[in-house]
Image (cartoon, helix red, strand yellow):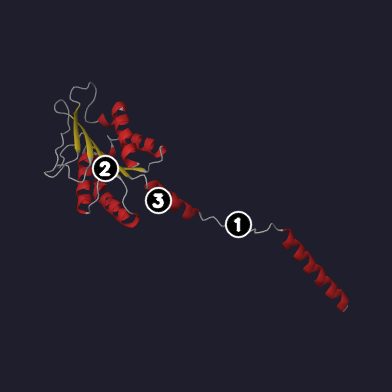
Amino acid sequence: MPGGTVVGGLRAIILVAVALCLAAPAGAAPKARVNPSSDRATIDVARHKTGEVFLLRGYADVFSRGLDAMAATLNRQGIDAKVTNHNSWRAIALEIIGRQRRLGPRPVVLVGHSLGANAVIQIAELLKKEHIAVQYMATFAATGPHPVPSNVRRVDNFYFATHGWGEPLTGAGDFSGRLSNRDFSDAEGVGHFNIDKQPAIQREVLARIIRYAKR
């Protein structure tokens, strides 16, 4: 191929490249690549800013399904509420402690039914050792609860003095928070196995969870 033809071809290629660069908008930058896993992590941290919200079921996960309905409502409100069995109480406490060490303080809300009601108090006891407060606790028909430790700010307990199965709560010696025991002995059709499913009680507890978790 003659040398003039080659030079002419290269000149044409260079002119086309220059024209394309000039046609690009001033200050244009390459599109940022989206990292889906990074986005999910950001969303997870943002959701946890609403607080640590855990709901613990009772024996065998059979009779505490009202907690699942409550958690679903909370998740629709943008609150990351987790439901699990009472046997997981120690793991939950360690999870809360670890996350608060990494990310800093955030509200803690604990709800439990039956053996789960006993377990949320045990979680609060471990959190107290780490100087972590529990802003709100709700217990349904606790069967053998420990005294409520002093790091709990407010607790609502729904129990049965007679005609049911569920104990009143007491505060530990240094407890100075707000403790409410609500006796449902005379509530028709309400017992140990369905107190967590009562719509009026759920609405009351949900309103408080949303209030305290978003502080």
In the rendered image, residue 70, in percent from the top left (x then y), is placed at 34, 35
Q: Amino acid at mark 3?
A: Val
Q: Distance from label 2 to label 3 (Cα)? A: 19 Å
Q: Distance from label 1 to label 2 (Cα)? A: 44 Å
Q: Establish if 40 lies above or below 163.
A: below
In the rendered image, residue 71, in percent from the top left (x then y), is placed at 35, 38
Q: Is residue 71 visible?
A: yes
Q: Secondary structure at mark 3?
A: helix
Q: Amino acid at mark 1?
A: Lys
Residue plotted at (30% across, 56% down): 101
Q: Residue farthest to the front?
A: 26
- Looking at the picture, tell me which residue is in the foreground, 174 or 148: 174
In the rendered image, residue 76, in percent from the top left (x then y), is placed at 41, 37
Q: Residue farthest to the left?
A: 173
Q: Earlier in the sequence, mark 1 or mark 3?
A: 1
Identify the image quadrant of the C terminus.
Answer: top left
Q: Which residue is mark 3?
A: 45
Residue plotted at (31% across, 51% down): 105
Q: Secondary structure at mark 2?
A: loop
Q: Is residue 193 left or right of residue 4?
A: left
Task: Check disc 3: other Cα within 10 Å, few if <14, some if 14-19, many if 20+.
Answer: few
Residue 83 falls in image quadrant: top left
Q: Establish if 68 lies above or below 47.
A: above
Q: Which residue is mark 2?
A: 135
Q: Amino acid at mark 2?
A: Gln
In the rendered image, residue 187, in percent from the top left (x then y), is placed at 22, 22
Q: Distance from label 1 to label 3 (Cα)? A: 25 Å
Q: Which mark is residue 31?
A: 1
Q: Nearer the viewer, mark 2 or mark 3?
A: 2
Q: Earlier in the sequence, mark 1 or mark 2?
A: 1
Task: Check disc 1: other Cα within 10 Å, few if <14, some if 14-19, many if 20+.
Answer: few
Q: Is residue 65 visible?
A: no
